[in-house]
Image (cartoon, grey):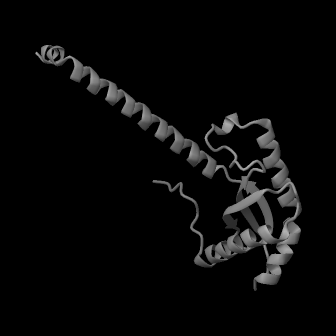
Amino acid sequence: MSKTSAPKVSPRVQRVADQIQRLLADLIRREIRDPRVGMVSVTGVDVSRDFAHANVHVTIMGRHGDDFGAGQALKDMGELDRKEIKDSLAALNKAAGYLRSLLGKEMSLRVIPALQFHYDDSVARGRYLSSLIDKAIAEDSTHEHVDETDSDQNPEQSRDGDN
């Protein structure tokens, strides 16, 4: 029997990843002034065991106030949304060296990881799935309501159908 799960992360690596996540969320909000970067939420950080690299997962709140992908299928995102995500990620990746130097001032590590930003669509996907569930529940309740009114209006027919 083979294991297909991800390799176990050591507690120290996890603590460092959590600290980087907290610090980056604050640093991006305070220090990044690029107009291409909207509201960014750091959803997770994966750090390599040797602390050389960190993949930073972010969600990006659009400049128009909508979370990209919310309420729509991710594949149906408009070209404008994709362009804004691409531009925001490009700006974040361009500022990665600067953010890394700021992290170095805040953290006491021998090696500060090189940062690579990635778009995390899990929040948008979760909202989309939640909207599908809400829609299914609403449709189900309308079907139940129709069935109840039919049986209330014709009680003789429902008794004859049972026999």
Going 80% across and 39% down the picture, which residue do you hit? Answer: 80
Q: Residue furthest left?
A: 163
Q: Position of residue 90 (x, y in %)?
A: 86, 54
Q: Position of residue 123 (x, y in %)?
A: 61, 52
Relative depth, front residue between 140 and 42: 140
Q: Position of residue 14 (x, y in %)?
A: 62, 73
Relative depth, front residue between 107 and 22: 22
Query: Picture quarter containing residue 143?
Result: top left
Going 22% across and 23% down the picture, which residue do you hit? Answer: 152
Q: Residue 82 vs residue 98: left or right?
A: left
Q: Residue furthest front?
A: 153
Query: Picture quarter containing residue 40?
Result: bottom right
Q: Quadrant of the C terminus?
A: top left
Q: Can you see residue 8?
A: yes
Going 67% across and 76% down the picture, which residue do you hit? Answer: 19
Q: Can you see residue 110?
A: no
Going 78% across and 72% down the picture, which residue do you hit? Answer: 27
Q: Position of residue 160 (x, y in %)?
A: 13, 13
- 53 relative to 118, above or below: below
Q: Residue 158 vs residue 56: left or right?
A: left
Q: Residue 102 vs residue 16: left or right?
A: right
- 162 relative to 124, above or below: above
